[in-house]
Image (cartoon, rainbow, N blue to C red):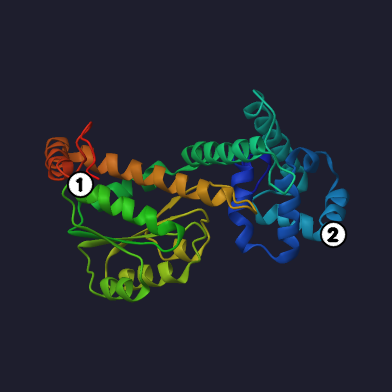
């Protein structure tokens, strides 16, 4: 987007874009971003001097921050923040907004509402900002791949395994790697017929970025799934898919990030499956039958 006025970044996506930009900002600019993200309505009412004081930085830093995140200047940022605050209020109009974070005084209701709030918003904002052209390119690459390798560690390891499992269910040759040695070995053997997928919320997990870089160097098409469009994982990706999950101190955001990642995984799976629906349906039926016999028989008494 251009930075030529208030339209440089819409009010509906400014908070998502600010959160995504955090790793690329200087420490003083990060303080400005945190103040703005924490209370966009209050920030929209402040003068540039007031916001600088709140962030314990200079007016020049606030102006530079506004330009860095895609606006012509601070007035345009304020307009976008006002719109974003109005949208946040509208989305929370059916009840009390949950706390942005939790502490020892939080009630169980606060815990429940906060987690559900972050999960729901992560899904909605991911859908709102997902690039469908990039998603289609990813689907096309997966459909044409001779093999698919998925890299993910930590919280993203389960997401990587979920994608591998779904692809296997429809007859695609897929592997999920969570150990850096195994991942690097597999990546080095890929070629132009393969697709490599890296999954990392931060996009900075070395054990995911390095295998993806190695796969790209070997000739494979690389796909990145991350929350941060300017991350190392994004730079290693031929095709980038971004989520829009919110992090919190107590890691409600970590659950939300996985929820958003799993949603994108489902989108990929369904879109790939429907390119050959008869074959996918037959494969799903065969794999279902293969494991049905492993289920306990309802009503059968357990032997003591």
Q: Is residue 121 in sight in this rendering?
A: yes
Q: Which residue is mark 2?
A: 56
Among all residues in the image, which is located at the extreme top? 94
Nearer to us: label 1 or label 2: 1
- Secondary structure, mark 2, is loop
| Closer-to-camera residue (177/41) | 177
Q: Is residue 140 in sight in this rendering?
A: no
Residue 160's spot in the image, x, y percent?
A: 35, 56
- Secondary structure, mark 1, is helix
* Residue drawn at (53%, 40%) of the image: 119
Q: Residues within 10 Å of mark 2 (few under 14, many from 20)?
A: few
* Residue drawn at (64%, 38%) of the image: 108
Q: Which residue is mark 1?
A: 169
Check contact, mark 1 vs mark 2: CB within 8 A.
no
Among all residues in the image, which is located at the extreme front? 304
Residue 33's place in the image compared with 216, above or below, is above
Residue 166's spot in the image, x, y percent?
A: 26, 47
**Left or right: 133 with respect to 5?**
left
**Left or right: 14 with respect to 172?**
right
Labels 1 and 2: the sequence-earlier one: 2
* Residue drawn at (38%, 53%) of the image: 159
Number of marks in the rendered image: 2
| Closer-to-camera residue (31/164) | 164
- Which image quadrant: the C terminus? top left
Q: Residues within 10 Å of mark 1 (few under 14, many from 20)?
A: many
Residue 28's spot in the image, x, y percent?
A: 76, 63
Q: CA distance from mark 1 to mark 2?
A: 54 Å
Residue 273's place in the image compared with 157, above or below, is above
Quarter location, residue 109? top right
Residue 31's spot in the image, x, y percent?
A: 75, 58
């Amino acid at each position: 987007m251009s930075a030529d006025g208030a339209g440089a970044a819409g009010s509906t996506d400014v908070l998502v874009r600010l959160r995504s930009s955090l790793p690329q900002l200087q420490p003083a600019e990060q303080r400005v971003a945190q103040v703005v993200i924490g209370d966009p309505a209050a920030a929209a009412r402040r003068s540039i001097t007031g916001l600088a004081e709140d962030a314990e930085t200079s007016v020049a830093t606030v102006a530079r921050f506004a330009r860095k995140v895609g606006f012509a200047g601070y007035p345009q940022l304020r307009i976008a923040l006002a719109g974003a605050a109005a949208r946040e209020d509208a989305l929370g109009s059916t009840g009390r907004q949950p706390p942005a974070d939790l502490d020892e005084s939080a009630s169980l209701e606060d815990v429940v509402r906060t987690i559900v709030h972050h999960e729901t918003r992560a899904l909605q904002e991911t859908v709102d900002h997902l690039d469908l052209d990039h998603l289609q390119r990813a689907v096309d690459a997966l459909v044409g791949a001779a093999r698919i390798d998925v890299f993910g560690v930590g919280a993203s390891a389960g997401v990587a395994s979920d994608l591998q499992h779904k692809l296997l269910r429809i007859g695609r040759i897929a592997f999920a790697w969570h150990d850096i040695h195994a991942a690097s070995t597999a990546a080095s053997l890929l070629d132009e017929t393969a697709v490599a997928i890296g999954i990392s919320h931060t996009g900075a997990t070395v054990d995911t970025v390095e295998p993806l870089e190695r796969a790209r160097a070997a000739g494979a098409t690389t796909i990145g799934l991350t929350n941060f469009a300017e991350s190392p994982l994004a730079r290693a990706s031929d095709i980038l898919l971004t989520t829009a999950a919110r992090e919190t101190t107590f890691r409600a955001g970590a659950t939300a990030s996985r929820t958003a990642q799993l949603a994108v995984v489902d989108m990929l799976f369904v879109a790939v499956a429907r390119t050959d629906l008869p074959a996918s349906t037959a494969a799903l039926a065969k794999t279902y039958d293969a494991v049905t016999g492993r289920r306990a028989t309802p009503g059968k008494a357990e032997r003591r």
